[in-house]
Amino acid sequence: MQLDYELLGFKAGLEIHQQLDTTEKLFCRCPPILKDVKDAKYSFSRYLRLSESELGEKDKAAIEEEKKEKKIRYIGYDTTCLVEADEEPPGPLNTEALDIALVISLLMNMHPVDKVFTMRKIVLDGSNTSGFQRTAYISSNGMIKSNFGNVSISSLCLEEDAAQKIDNADKNEDTYSLDRLGIPLVEISTAADIKSLKQLREVAEKIGMILRSTEKVKRGLGTIRQDVNISIKDGARVEIKGVQDLRSLEEVAKNEVIRQINLLNIKKTLKERCATVNKKIFNVSGDDTFAINLKKFGNLPEIEREFDTRLKKFNPDYYAIISNDKDAKLIGLKEEIDYKNGDLAIVVRDKRKKAISILNSILERADYFLIGVPEETRRALPDNTSEYMRPLPGAARMYPETDVEPIIIDRDKIERIKENLPELIDHRTERYIKDYLISEELASLISRSKNYRFFEDVVNKYNLPPTLVIRTLEIIPQELKRNNIPVENITKNHFISLFRIIQSKEIAKEGIPQILEFLAKNPDKSVEDAIKYIGLNTVDLADIEEYIDKIIEEKRDLLINKRDLSFSPLMGVVMKEFRGKVDGKKISDILKRKIDEFIKNI
């Protein structure tokens, strides 16, 4: 489907959550490391209950989570403590994490606050043992430049990561691992200034680049998560959580726009039908089976899919969605619930309180179908669509954390950080292109690598071609890794020895892949051992010339028939003998000279 995003009034904002690479968690001294579930040392279970805030308010998203009435099981390790279990008050906010958050803030031209206050953000899905997530507002009013216009950075918060959900076969119980709970992360929120899918991806890439430039963020799967807020004209703001990678971001946003367009079309259809939401809940069987009847809501698959997703989340003992008056599930209910052809009936069986609560939620959602697009939080799915999670949280979700003292941000400290801000990866790329005369592709590759400082040292110390150093440090190891070679075994000392030997011309650059493969498989061996084992010791030019003369004599017929075209096949034969022992260019020059001499004498 071709979409005109400007005509649709597309607006988007990003929330990026990035784990920080600190030595301790945010509010306790536990190490921020992930453990295997098999290493669990203990477990405990809880039911989370929602209480009113000090202002007498309840957050609507938390209210919906509470309706699920799920038992929550937590598993802990020898690296988790009483703070993660919410059996001990939190310690002071981690100042190492705060300093990293300030660096990120200043790299995005943000304005840090004078005093950092920790807040509690209500979370009742079980991912926090306390029922809330601790978060601290650090800075605001930043800006990111993009090719499609500037995008404001509204806020940067420092918060604790949630516990990780573990697969569990018991539908009445959720299990969470406490190893991730409390790991420091930053939440970066942009304004809804993004007007196209390309700009959405570009801004996400730029924020990711800034985060990696600090060298103080964790890398790998699950260490960065992206949420995207999307709206269109006549639609509503919808938050989609958990977009895992940039490749998915544009597709998720596009699918959400299509979903909102479809919902607006459904609204139009329902209005034309004069559809209504009858709020009556019918008790249709004893004390545990209840039903509702939505007048003229039938035969709309999008509505049925939406209700099916929500009912699965509430996890009743039984439910049915009926939009056909011949459906066997409707037998005996038709007159009782005033069902007519074209209506949509929903039946739920469970404990009375839970069943009625579930159907009230469905009725609330049905009202929104008449309005159009509801404001809500959705979860990104592997196919880049999304599913309903809960309503958008409101202001009642946040209230002060009374167990953590505020921290004053010293202005002198801000100035010291400003004077020592890290070089942005994009700026480093531009510098490498200019200083080392390499392509943008190679400059970008090494700029993003953890080896960039080592690269500079090697080029300057050994006076080797920058392209050769990049190929040795980055490209060849990647190629070997694709063949399941354990390149992580290659040490910095291995590389130093290898570059020293290349500089002294003891081996040719063609031998580098073989040497690195040997060292990866034999990390306790030296580069010299690799050269000796593979047989890469350099040879005299006289030996090369003698070998080429021999090959030319053996391939006389080929040379007579093909003349200059015989170069490629002969080069392959010679390189097979001398690969890694002699620079390929030297062999090429000698072979060309010998072929020319032979042809002249024919």
Image (spheres, rainbow, N blue to C red):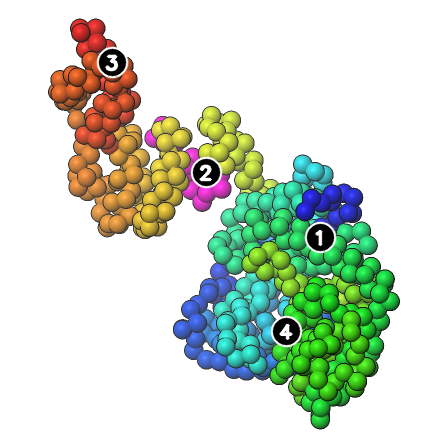
Residue at the image point whose x is 40% and y is 30% from the top: 466
Which stretch appears magenta? 446-463
Q: Earlier in the sequence, mark 2 or mark 1?
A: 1
- At label 1, the amino acid type is Val
**Which element type, helix, strand or loop, lies under badge 4?**
helix
List the single residue furthest toward the bottom.
Answer: 286
Judged left or right of residue 56, residue 533 is: left
**Which element type, helix, strand or loop, lies under badge 1?**
helix
4 and 2 marks in contact (CB < 8 Å):
no
**Which element type, helix, strand or loop, lies under badge 2?**
helix
Q: Which residue is mark 1?
A: 257
Q: Which residue is mark 3?
A: 563
Judged left or right of residue 456, residue 571 is: left
What is the spatial separation of the Cα atoms under label 2 and label 1, in whole angstroms?
A: 37 Å
Q: Nearer the viewer, mark 4 or mark 2?
A: 4
Q: Give yes or no for residue 458 being in the magenta stretch.
A: yes
What is the spatial separation of the Cα atoms under label 4 and label 1, in whole angstroms?
A: 24 Å
Q: Where does the C terminus fall, quadrant-wise?
A: top left
Q: Earlier in the sequence, mark 4 or mark 2?
A: 4
The picture quadrant where one finds residue 355 is: bottom right
What is the spatial separation of the Cα atoms under label 3 and label 1, in whole angstroms?
A: 64 Å
Circle on res. 313: 4
